[in-house]
Amino acid sequence: MTGKIIRGVGGFYYVHDRVSEIYECRARGIFRNRKIKPLVGDDVEFEVTHEADREGNIVDILPRRNALIRPAVANVGQALLVFAAAEPEPNLNLLDRFLVTLKLQGVPVVICFNKTKIARDGTPETLAETYRNAGYRVILADALTGGGLAEIRAVLAGKTTVLAGPSGVGKSTLTNLIQPGAGMETGAVSEKIRRGRHTTRHSELFFVEPGTFVMDTPGFSTVFVEKLEPERLQDCFPEFAPFVPDCRFLGCVHIGERECGVKTALADGRIAASRYENYKLIYEELKNQRRY
């Protein structure tokens, strides 16, 4: 049989058969010998050892399209970055770090600002404008009222999507709206793995419909950008590109140089100040990493 790993805890891997059943599986020792560790999101072949108890063994891992390190997950089609428009206030530095790291890993991104109904007037629209002007698709949503849910469903259809963002922004609530059975499935499996239903401690996939899976990940408080030359950081800020030809100096990094097209666009309001400030912060961190 073939299926997809939706969760891995304590040496057990929970495999969805792509229809309706979840099997608790162990990985054969051959994977240790090959130095391959199964990941959430892996498509696998497995054999059923006890049908009544839904138990089995993973016998092979099918070829991966990609694999992320944090969170550790395979075969990701896209990321939906969920941040609250209020309660908590959006941490745009963290959002921009997510965008940089996902760009480096080649994962397409959609941004969702949740809790729009309790945000100050104009705040969700200002946030959306900032990131749409930077070239990203942005969805304004409210999990309590269902606002934006139809657009989110359309974005998710036919893909494996990672939901990422800080704690308390409504990722798990959105997951349960997208797939009401998610809480029920989690509860059923929790009888074996003994974990709470409502706090995400491990990355886990939820089956929505054939071809569509959603991954809820643990909340992140920080993201470190690593293994990137500081001069290449600007490639992760797509709104800079149209103004780079106006820079006087070849190799301009848009910080200390005079006659810089990016800084001129910033002064004219064509680049958001928050994005530029976060660019400078990350750039300095990358310089310090290279130095030490």
Image (tube, helix red, strand yellow):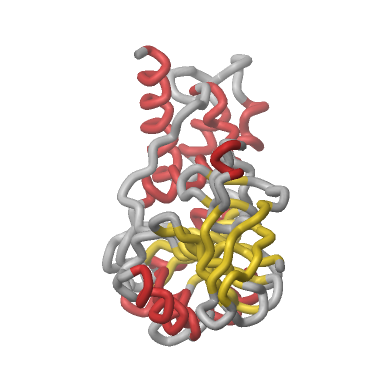
Residue 143 image-quadrant placement: bottom left
Q: Residue at x 69, y 60 (%)?
A: 45
In the image: residue 180, left or right of residue 284 = right
- Residue 56 appears left or right of 140: right
Task: Give the residue displayed 50% in from the left and 42% down from the top.
Answer: 69
Q: Quarter holding the N terminus?
A: bottom right
* Left or right side of 69 for 47: right
The location of residue 75, given as percent across then percent down, is: 64, 54
In depth, the one of 42 and 12 nearer the eye is 12
Q: Is residue 30 above or below residue 217?
A: above
Q: Quadrant of residue 105?
A: top right
Of residues 282 and 49, the one drawn nearer to the viewer in this rendering: 49
Q: Please count the marks in the image.
A: 0
Question: Seen in the image, is 121 located left or right of residue 103?
Answer: left
Above or below, 221 against 177 in this view is above
Vertical relation: 258 (above or below) 242 = above
Image quarter of residue 84: bottom left
List x then y, in percent, for residue 157: 67, 72
**Position of residue 60 measured from the top left corner of the image (x, y, whole percent):** 67, 53
**What residue do we see at 60% from left, 15% from top?**
249
Q: Determine whether 183 is above or below 96 in the image.
A: below
Residue in the image at 58% along x and 41% along y: 36
State which quarter of the image contains the C terminus.
Answer: top left
Expressed as whole percent of the image width and height from the top left, the position of residue 43 reads: 66, 58
**Residue at the front extreme of this rendering:** 49
Q: Nearer the viewer, residue 130 or 85?
A: 85
- Relative depth, front residue between 2 and 123: 2
Q: Is residue 179 visible?
A: yes
Residue 239 seen in render:
no
